[in-house]
Image (cartoon, helix red, strand yellow):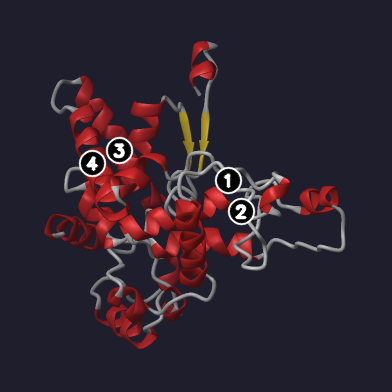
C-alpha cells in the first residue's frame, strides 16, 4: 500500500462494507464501540480513505438508498475541508475504543502477538488449514460479536475441497484464489506449523473454539445468550423475512406493522423513518 502510493498509483479497495464486516447488519457491540458520530459503514470507508490512503471503494447496491451512508461518509470529508469537524479525531476515538475492547477481551499479549509467526495455508505444515484467517475470525467474534460476518467467512473455508489422495500441489491448485485455505481439521497435527508461535496450545484452543462456533450456525437466541447481539439491519425488506432472522414470525409481524414499509416490499429500501430509527438506536447503544 505504501509503495503504491509512493508510485502515485490508484488503489482500489474491494468490498469494505460486505467482505470487510457485513456492516449493513452490524453487531450491537460493533455499533456501540464505533460510537454515535460515525456509522460502521461510514467508519470503514473513512478509515480506508483517510488512514490507509485508498482512492476508490467498491460497494454493492440494489437501489439508490443503499448509497445513503456512503454519501454521508463522503460529506464528512467535505465538512472537514470546511473546518467544521475534525475527522481524524472522530476516527481515532473509534479506533481506540475498538482496540481497547480487543485487549480487554483477548488479553494484551494475544492482542499484540497472537497473529505473529503463523504460517499461511500454502505451507505444507498447515495441511491447507488457514490458521491465521480462522484466528482472525475468532478475535473479531470474541471481541465485537460479529457473528454473521464471521460465519459467512468460515463457510467458505468449510466448502474448500481437500482430497488427500491427490498430491500437495494438486490440492493447493484446487483451493479458491479469493479466499484460500480450509477450515480447522482436528485430525491434522499442527505442532510443526505452530513451533514458532509463543503459545501453540492457545492457538489450538482458539481454532477448535472457532470451528465449534461457526461450523453449524447458531440461532438468534443462542447468540444473545453469548452476548453477541445484533445491532440493526439496513438490508431491504423481503417477502420472506425468515431468511434473514431465525425468528421468522417475529420478523413477519415487525414488517407488517411497520408504517410505510408494506406493499411492494421487494422494491422498497429503508425509508427516512427507518434511517431515523437506526440513528436513534446508535445513540441509545
Q: Do the residues labelled 1 and 2 touch (CB within 8 Å)?
A: yes
Residue that protrudes farthest toward the right in the picture: 166
Callout 4 secondary element = helix
State which tag comes first along the sequence, 4 or 2.
4
Q: Is residue 238 above or below residue 64?
A: below
Which label lies toward us, 3 or 2?
Answer: 2
The CA distance from mark 1 to mark 2 is: 6 Å
123 relative position to 25: left or right? right
Outermost residue toward the bottom? 249
Crowd tier of the residue under label 1, counting other residues whose Cα lies within 10 Å: few below 14, some 14–19, many 20 or above = few
Residue at image location 21% in from the left, 25% down from the top:
80
- Is 154 positioned to the left or the right of 165 in the image? left
Residue on which disc 4 sits: 94
Comparing marks 3 and 1, which lies closer to the viewer? 1
Q: Nearer the viewer, mark 4 or mark 1?
A: 1
For marks 4 and 3, give the one nearer the viewer.
4
Q: Position of residue 44 (x, y in %)?
A: 36, 41
Between marks 4 and 2, how big is the CA–CA gap? 37 Å
Q: For mark 2, what is the residue?
A: 191
Residue that badge 3 annotates:
73
From the image, tell me which residue sits under label 1: 195
Toward the viewer: 161 or 52? 161
- Nearest to viewer (mark 4 / mark 2): 2
Amino acid at each position: 500500500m505504501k509503495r503504491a502510493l509512493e508510485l502515485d498509483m490508484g488503489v482500489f479497495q474491494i468490498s469494505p462494507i460486505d467482505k470487510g464486516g457485513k456492516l449493513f447488519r452490524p453487531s450491537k457491540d460493533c455499533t456501540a464501540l464505533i460510537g454515535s458520530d460515525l456509522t460502521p459503514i461510514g467508519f470503514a470507508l473513512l478509515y480506508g480513505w483517510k488512514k490507509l490512503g485508498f482512492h476508490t471503494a467498491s460497494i454493492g447496491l440494489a437501489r439508490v438508498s443503499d448509497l445513503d451512508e456512503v454519501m454521508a461518509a463522503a460529506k464528512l470529508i467535505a465538512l472537514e475541508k470546511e473546518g467544521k469537524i475534525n475527522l481524524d479525531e472522530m476516527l481515532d476515538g473509534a479506533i481506540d475504543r475498538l482496540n481497547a475492547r480487543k485487549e480487554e477481551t483477548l488479553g494484551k499479549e494475544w492482542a499484540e502477538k497472537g497473529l505473529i509467526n503463523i504460517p499461511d495455508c500454502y505451507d505444507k505444515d498447515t495441511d491447507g488449514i488457514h490458521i491465521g484467517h480462522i484466528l482472525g475470525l475468532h478475535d473479531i467474534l470474541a471481541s465485537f460479536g460479529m457473528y454473521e460476518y464471521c460465519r459467512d467467512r468460515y463457510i467458505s473455508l468449510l466448502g474448500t475441497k481437500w482430497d488427500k489422495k491427490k498430491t500437495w500441489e494438486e490440492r493447493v491448485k484446487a483451493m479458491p484464489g479469493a479466499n484460500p485455505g480450509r477450515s480447522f481439521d482436528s485430525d491434522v497435527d499442527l505442532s510443526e506449523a505452530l513451533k514458532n508461535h509463543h503459545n501453540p496450545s492457545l492457538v489450538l484452543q482458539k481454532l477448535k473454539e472457532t470451528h465449534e462456533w461457526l461450523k453449524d450456525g447458531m440461532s438468534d437466541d443462542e447468540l444473545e445468550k453469548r452476548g453477541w447481539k445484533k445491532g440493526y439491519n439496513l438490508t431491504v425488506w423481503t417477502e420472506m423475512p425468515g431468511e434473514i432472522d431465525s425468528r421468522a414470525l417475529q420478523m413477519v409481524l415487525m414488517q407488517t406493522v411497520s408504517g410505510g414499509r408494506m406493499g411492494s416490499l421487494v422494491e422498497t429500501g429503508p425509508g427516512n423513518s427507518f434511517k431515523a430509527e437506526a440513528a436513534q438506536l446508535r445513540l441509545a447503544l
